[in-house]
Amino acid sequence: MAMSINANNNAAEGLWDFKVVGEVDISNAHYFKTQLEAALAEKQQNIRIDLEDLNYIDSTGLGVIIGCYGQIKKDGLTIKLVNPKPNVKKLLTISGFDKVLL
């Protein structure tokens, strides 16, 4: 399954809203990374990523999120993941990133 990303600047909340649909894996993680970077280049703000329609994410995709988090944390910003499916939440829990990203 392919991945699609919808990014919107939520001026009312002062953050970027991302909606990720499908699967994030090694074949498309670079695209995900470029979308996050492009948003931050446009406007440095916190990021909220809605995972409600994300069916799968591998370690490469998780690495993109963690790498972005590490970069923006330096500027006092953060990333929050919302609505993860059980399999995605399990990966976050196993990796220990549930405490930071959820």
Image (cartoon, rainbow, N blue to C red):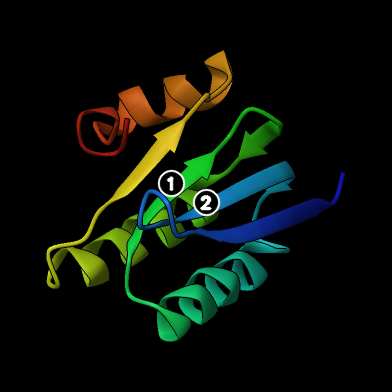
Q: Nearer the viewer, residue 71 or 93?
A: 71
* SS at circle 1: strand
Residue behind mark 2? 17
Residue 89 drawn at (x, y percent): 45, 22
**Residue most extreme to the bottom:** 41
Residue shown at the point (59%, 41%) measured from the top left = 57
Residue 39 drawn at (x, y percent): 50, 74
Residue shown at the point (66%, 71%) measured from the top left = 31
Side of 43 relative to 69 (left or right): right
* SS at circle 2: strand
Which image quadrant is residue 52 in?
A: top right
Position of 34 relative to 63 (above/below): below
**Which of marks 2 and 1 precedes in the sequence?**
2
Side of 59 relative to 71 (left or right): right
Residue 88 drawn at (x, y percent): 53, 27
Q: Residues within 10 Å of mark 1 (few under 14, many from 20)?
A: many
Q: Name the quarter where the N terminus is drawn.
A: top right
Q: Residues within 10 Å of mark 2 (few under 14, many from 20)?
A: many
Q: Are marks 1 and 2 in contact (CB under 8 Å)?
A: yes
Q: Nearer the viewer, residue 35 or 44?
A: 44
**Residue most extreme to the top:** 86
Q: Which label sits on residue 12?
A: none
Q: Name the quarter where the C terminus is drawn.
A: top left
Residue shown at the point (67%, 35%) measured from the top left = 54
Distance Cα–Cα, label 1 vs label 2: 5 Å
Q: Tell me the kind of residue under disc 2.
A: Asp
Position of 58 relative to 78 (above/below): above
Residue behind mark 1? 48
Residue 94 drawn at (x, y percent): 33, 25
Side of 28 relative to 13 (left or right): right
